[in-house]
Image (spheres, rainbow, N blue to C red):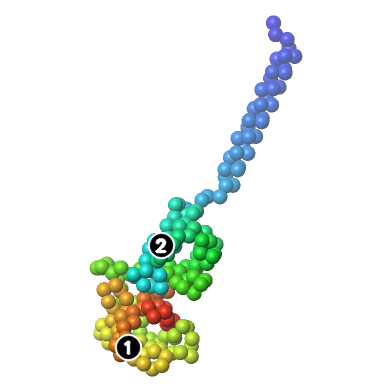
Amino acid sequence: MSHPSRSLRAASHAARFAVIFGFVIVLCSEIAGAAPVPQGNQGAGFLGQWCAQGDPNKTTSITSNGGVFFNLTNENGDTSPGTLQGPNVMSAPGWQFVTGTLTSDGSQINWSNGTFWARCNNGGGGGGWRRPRIEGTWYRSGNRSQRCSIRRRGDTYTLTNEASARATGSWDSRRQLTTNWSGTIISGIVTNGGNRINWNNGTFWTR
């Protein structure tokens, strides 16, 4: 016949274990519920192929292993890791911590060293492309005292720069605006929702 005190002690130990076990389960469920959900799509706007200074011959790229670590490759083949500093800012520690800011429309990365990467316009028969409406007043380098203009007649554009020089222009097969300034050919890529033209001579117009 078992001793009554031993039975009481066994029952007490079992009750204590049940209480502790239940507390552990509740604590684990609360911790799991409080854990942040990984944001796998952070930085997705930076991913893909880019063209340095808008030049299709200077391709660059940004890849990711799942939204945490990024790898950047410039037009010379040099690489740098990339880290997000915010939803639209990326730092490149391997390139003297230069930072790039993604434009609101995702078409360009403006780097803190004065350069930029633009989305490469590969052309090639994409039926959904609509040429942007670029007619109107523009300003060289965003300077309101350096007024420029673009007018359109059919498929041909007439451009006037800040010095009142004129050129004709049209869209080419790469979806770039090719202009002829008295024999000097300058091509431009329209970015920032149609409000900026990056010219391949290093200048830009905004409006």
Residue linked to disc 1: 181
Question: Who's the residue at 32% across and 86% down the image?
Answer: 184
Distance between mark 2 and mark 1 Cα atoms: 33 Å
Question: Who's the residue at 49% across and 67% down the image?
Answer: 100
Secondary structure under the numbered disc 2 in the rendered image? loop
User: Who comes first in sequence, dot 2 or dot 1?
Assistant: 2
What kind of residue is marked 1? Trp
State whether residue 162 is above or below residue 63. below
Badge 2: residue crowd in 10 Å (few <14, some 14–19, many ≥20) = few
Total labels: the figure holds: 2
Badge 1: residue crowd in 10 Å (few <14, some 14–19, many ≥20) = some
Image-quadrant location for residue 77: bottom left
State whether residue 30 is above or below residue 84. above
Question: Who's the residue at 38% across and 94% down the image?
Answer: 164
Quarter of the image that includes the N terminus: top right
Any mark on residue 77, and which? 2
Whether residue 119 is visible, yes or no, is: no
Q: Nearer the viewer, residue 202 or 140?
A: 202
Secondary structure under the numbered disc 1 in the rendered image? strand
Q: Residue furthest bottom?
A: 164
State whether residue 123 is above or below residue 134. above
What kind of residue is marked 2? Gly
Whether residue 129 is visible, yes or no, is: yes
Q: Nearer the viewer, residue 165 or 36?
A: 165
